[in-house]
Amino acid sequence: MIITWGLHIPVIKMGVQMVEPISLNLVRFIGTGLLFLPFAGRISLSDLIKLIPVSLFFVSGNLICAYIALDYVSSNSFIILVQSAQPFTLVLAWFLFKERFGIYTTTGIIIALSGLIVVFGAPDILSAPFGAFMVLAAAFFWSAGSLAMKRTGHIKPAAFLSYSYLMSIPIALIATYMLEDHQVQSFIDADPLTIGFVLVYQIGLMGIMTFVWSDLMARYPAQYITPFLMLQPIVAIIGSYFMLGEELTREIIMGGIIVLFGIGIINFRRLTLFKKSEKTASAE
């Protein structure tokens, strides 16, 4: 699953190099929504309403901003900057839900965000600050959408995927109409094998990985599973080198080490606290 998610970044980069980013999102939203609709079953009106913020933030805001960002910055810069999603989630949870965290987590957040400052010195980001802004926007929307998912855990994955993506279609349709041109022609001019691979990867494989992630989260405590996400940047960087020929810059290497070190502190602290609570519960 981590390999699939990591390679997804250079795969998106391949797609936006050929076609308009928002129109590529539109096709992905339509394809994913329709592919999993036959397995979705019925869904109550209250659950459908709960999926609206997920569709707005996690699907529309996150993916559209991410695709636009990858039209400006390298995959390597993107994968490091987007790691800001985890600190953003903690800060949003503190602001919206008054969730508390201690000195270790605070230190991890500060270190991770400090690493982003180093990454901002990368040549592609200096030449395209708008792309960096869109990466951070994607991370923010991912965080907001993740918090919205706290109310949707009982919805089965097929319904979650299908309805959240279908509800995102009007947003992508309006956005591509207002901001892009020659959408159909860009698909016609794209290499059919490459764009076909990109769409199959995004619609089919990424959808299946959502089921895998849901099953893992159901079987094991989140504190044991989420630290593996720290391997995703490594996979993405290796994939970017072999698939796109992207080279690592000094700023990406140094900034990435700092960011992952900060996130490592956060994950280690959460795992430690979870283990302590488990021991306390078993002792009682």
Image (tube, rainbow, N blue to C red):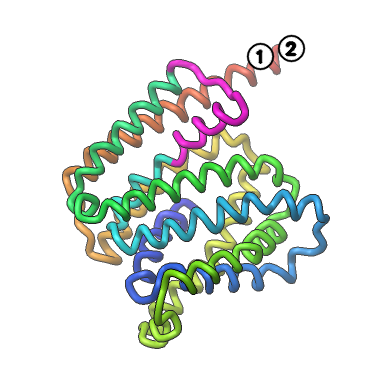
Residue under the image location 64 percent in, 68 percent down: 33
> Label 2 sits on what residue type?
Glu
Residue 94 among magenta residues = yes
- Compared across the picture, whether 258 is left or right of 141 comes to left
Tell me the CA gap for discs 1 and 2. Answer: 6 Å
> Label 1 sits on what residue type?
Thr
- Compared across the picture, whether 83 is left or right of 102 comes to left
* Disc number for residue 284: 2
- 149 or 283, nearer to the observer: 149
Above or below 146: residue 39: below
Residue under the image location 18 percent in, 49 percent down: 249
Are the residues flagged by discs 1 and 2 in contact, CB closer than 8 Å? yes
By secondary structure, the bulk of the magenta-drawn segment is best described as helix
Residue under the image location 43 percent in, 69 percent down: 179
Residue 175 among magenta residues = no
* Disc number for residue 151: none
Q: Quadrant of the C terminus?
A: top right
Disc 1: which residue = 280
Residue 53: % across, % down: 64, 50
Total marks shown come to 2
User: What are the residue bounds of the magenta stretch?
Assistant: 85-103
